Image (cartoon, grey):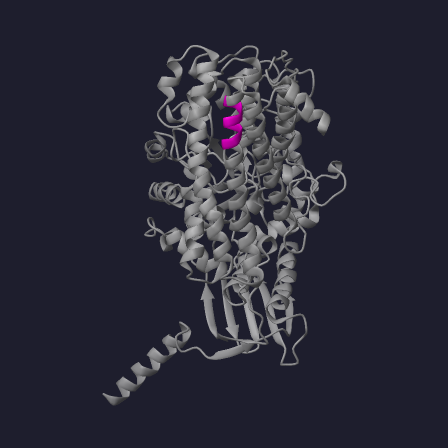
């Protein structure tokens, strides 16, 4: 009996040791020798990053202690996609991956979990507390299955990255920066990337992504890696009449990507990411949905056959986005994809999925996934700030997981640098939703983020993030909040209405604040409509401005609880964005008052309010510069190529508006060709305005 008991205890001891409970503590420090047995170029990038991570944790001075050998292996016996195991021994650490991605993710998991390296370190500059050595336990650590198999970042609104820290825009994407960006994705356990919009399939930064181990995925409007915007001039973008040109166009794109790990997009949209029938002379919006679907199905089959022919892979990785009109067609059962397609059900750009998504997902017999946004650019939403509430993301992703949409996820990260809060929440769900599935309400995510990024339980810091979301206002849709991109759009549109003395009812039908839309639409003349609208907007902005003013004060207080790199990151992640939103909202409030005075020919009051608005706009631009230049200055000129939020354009337009109000002459309001979806440059000739304040205003001009 005693022998049996001793044997049982011995067995339990062995099991406990294997599981790490009774593992031996060992020291690690900065004296490592990395032996890369993978013969993988992608792994070599991660191996170099690992040495940098040791330097970041322990300092760059090499320790005199015994050498720690690190082995990097790809072990084909570990069957499966993207799996790893880390074995920690005395003076030896062995990383095994089932494939390149598995091994790379093992390396970065060790850096984060044991060395304390922030996966976003390039963007945050958050560094771990330095040490001569640290104690860790021996044993084996194995990866567990990720919630989503293929995890892809879509780098959209990439105008800020083009020319990053370069003198000429023509040079294109900066490979030094893109390498750090891809490294960040791999640190976050991503498997693929859409490197940008309008990317030629043989561009250097696409090749770099592949060389670093990421699968190449493709924009929903750029099937098989082709770019409709670069379609040959003079040839209609019409499948009905130009099939041979399409086949060559797609063949060339596929040939350039042959040999890379690619997730091919099967899709068909028009030249500028619009419905394809807008560019087809034999089709129109009024064509039957069956005729439209027939063309889409012909295109999808042609693209699929070309991929198989050119790559030699009879079952290539393919996906289909249900974005825009294709979603409606698919939900009606009209679109036919190959049997191995991953169908990506798309949100509406604001985090929420359209009606019918989950019923269609349940009826779908193909593999399924998600196309989700943390940021969406349409000239009036959340370009550079987080406005999708964490509760919305949790609710929608919980639905996606429960309906088994987990074969693939494409996360549109927008301008990544400003979206770490939302990106991190989505990364949690992409990698391990079960660990967060019960954390749906209250302050959980705000508290979690404060602990994760700042290692603090500070209620002050957590509250500033919570308030940042509650300060956002809605225009009839509480889950679709405007962001910083809204403000220039608002100023531009309202000035045009004022100058032309004609209200655009369509604008107000969509965007009117509160519940006054019906009352507004009952009004007939320009002056009464302008007065009603500007009163409503001024009230909305002033109430929101008061909230932002409080939040600015709270962030100043919260900064006192931080120091070093944490203080630096909090400044650019929360304090300065809060101050920027205060100034933009105050600008809009003063501008709305000014325009109301203007409509009532109270030009002197109009000028005073416009000047106040201009000062707030200048401060917002200055804050953007402070965000760029914060820390080491590596993000200097980050906003240099901004053609989307256009904060700087608010200053230009308001300066011209004040000049107009002062001299009461005509003024040309310029439309800038911001992107391919925007109409070309137009000019509006404005009439002469009389004023009782003519003499005073002329005197003011002479005095200047």
Quadrant containing the N terminus in the rendered view: bottom left
Quadrant containing the C terminus in the rendered view: top right
Indicate the position of residue 688 as horizontal and vertical percent values.
64, 12
Inspect the magenta stretch and tell me whether residue 307 lies in it. no
Give the left or right position of residue 702, taking residue 471 as reference. right
Query: From what the image shows, is residue 18 above or below residue 609?
Result: below
Residue at the (63%, 62%) spot, across then down = 47
Residue ranking furthest to the left: 1
Task: Tell me if residue 329 can be seen.
Answer: yes
Indicate the position of residue 648 as horizontal and vertical percent values.
63, 35
Residue at the (60%, 13%) spot, across then down = 241
Identify the main secondary structure in magenta: helix
In this view, the residue in front, 20 or 187, is: 187
Residue at the (55%, 42%) spot, across then down = 580
Query: From what the image shows, is residue 243 above or below residue 82?
Result: above
Residues rendered magenta in the picture: 589-596
Report which quarter residue 546 is drawn in.
Answer: top left
Report which quarter residue 133 is drawn in.
Answer: bottom right
In this view, the residue in front, 656 or 328, is: 656
Inspect the magenta stretch and tell me whether residue 591 lies in it. yes
Task: Tell me if residue 75 can be seen.
Answer: no
Indicate the position of residue 428 as horizontal and vertical percent values.
44, 52
Indicate the position of residue 192 as horizontal and vertical percent values.
55, 45
In this view, the residue in front, 320 or 425, is: 425
């Amino acid at each position: 009996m005693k022998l049996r008991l001793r044997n049982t205890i011995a067995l339990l001891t062995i099991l406990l040791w294997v599981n790490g409970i009774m593992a031996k503590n060992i020291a690690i420090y900065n004296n490592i020798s990395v032996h890369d047995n993978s013969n993988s170029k992608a792994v070599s990038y991660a191996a170099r990053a690992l040495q940098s991570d040791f330097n970041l944790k322990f300092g760059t001075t090499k320790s005199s202690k015994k050498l720690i050998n690190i082995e990097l292996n790809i072990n084909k016996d570990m069957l499966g996609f993207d799996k790893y195991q880390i074995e920690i021994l005395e003076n030896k650490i062995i990383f095994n991956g089932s494939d390149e991605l598995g091994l790379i993710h093992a390396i970065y998991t060790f850096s984060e979990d044991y060395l304390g390296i922030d996966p976003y370190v390039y963007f945050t500059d958050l560094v771990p507390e330095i040490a001569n050595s640290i104690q860790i336990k021996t044993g084996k650590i194995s990866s567990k299955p990720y919630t989503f198999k293929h995890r892809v970042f879509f780098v959209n609104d990439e105008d800020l990255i083009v020319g990053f820290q370069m003198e000429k825009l023509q040079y294109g994407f900066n490979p030094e920066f893109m390498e750090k960006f891809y490294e960040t994705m791999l640190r976050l356990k991503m498997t693929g990337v859409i490197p940008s919009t309008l990317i030629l399939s043989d561009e250097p930064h696409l090749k770099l992504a592949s060389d670093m181990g990421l699968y190449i995925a493709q924009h929903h409007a750029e099937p098989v890696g082709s770019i409709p915007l670069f379609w040959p001039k003079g040839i209609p973008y019409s499948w009905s009449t130009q099939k041979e040109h399409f086949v060559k166009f797609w063949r060339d794109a596929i040939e350039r990507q042959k040999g890379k790990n690619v997730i091919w997009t099967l899709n068909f949209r028009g030249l500028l990411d619009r419905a394809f029938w807008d560019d087809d002379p034999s089709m129109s919006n009024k064509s039957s949905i069956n005729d439209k679907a027939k063309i889409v199905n012909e295109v999808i089959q042609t693209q699929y056959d070309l991929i198989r022919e050119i790559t030699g892979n009879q079952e290539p990785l393919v996906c289909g986005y249900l974005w825009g009109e294709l979603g409606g067609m698919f939900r009606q059962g009209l679109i036919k994809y190959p049997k191995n397609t991953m169908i990506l059900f798309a949100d509406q750009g604001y985090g929420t999925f359209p009606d019918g998504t989950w019923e269609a997902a349940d009826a779908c017999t193909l593999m399924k996934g998600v196309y989700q946004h943390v940021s969406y650019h349409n000239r009036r939403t959340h370009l550079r700030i987080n406005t999708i509430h964490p509760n919305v993301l949790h609710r929608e992703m919980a639905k996606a997981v429960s309906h088994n949409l987990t074969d693939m996820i494409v996360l549109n990260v927008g301008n990544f640098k400003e979206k770490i809060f939302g990106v991190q929440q989505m990364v949690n769900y992409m990698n391990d939703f079960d660990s967060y599935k019960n954390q749906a309400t209250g302050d959980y995510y705000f508290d979690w983020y404060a602990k994760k990024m700042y290692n603090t339980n500070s209620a002050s810091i957590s509250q500033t993030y919570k308030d940042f979301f509650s300060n956002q206002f809605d225009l009839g849709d509480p889950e679709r909040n405007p962001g910083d991109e809204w403000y220039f759009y608002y100023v531009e549109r309202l000035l045009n209405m004022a100058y032309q003395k004609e209200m655009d009812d369509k604008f107000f039908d969509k965007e009117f604040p509160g519940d006054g839309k019906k009352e507004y639409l009952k009004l007939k003349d320009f002056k009464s409509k302008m007065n009603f609208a500007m009163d409503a907007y001024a009230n909305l902005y002033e109430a929101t401005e008061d909230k932002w003013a409080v939040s600015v004060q709270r962030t100043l207080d919260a900064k006192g609880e931080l120091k070093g790199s944490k203080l630096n990151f909090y400044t650019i992640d929360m304090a300065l964005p809060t101050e920027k939103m205060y100034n933009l909202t105050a600008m809009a409030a003063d501008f709305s008052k000014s325009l109301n005075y203007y409509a009532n020919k109270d030009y002197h009051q109009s000028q005073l309010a416009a000047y106040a608005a201009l000062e707030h706009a200048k401060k917002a631009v200055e804050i953007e510069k402070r965000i760029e230049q914060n820390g080491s200055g590596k993000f200097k000129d980050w906003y240099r190529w901004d053609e989307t939020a256009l904060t700087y354009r608010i200053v230009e337009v308001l300066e011209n508006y004040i000049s107009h109000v002062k001299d009461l002459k005509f003024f040309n309001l310029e439309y800038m060709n911001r992107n391919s979806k925007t109409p070309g440059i137009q000019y509006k000739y404005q009439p002469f305005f009389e004023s009782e304040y003519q003499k005073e205003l002329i005197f003011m001009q002479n005095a200047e």
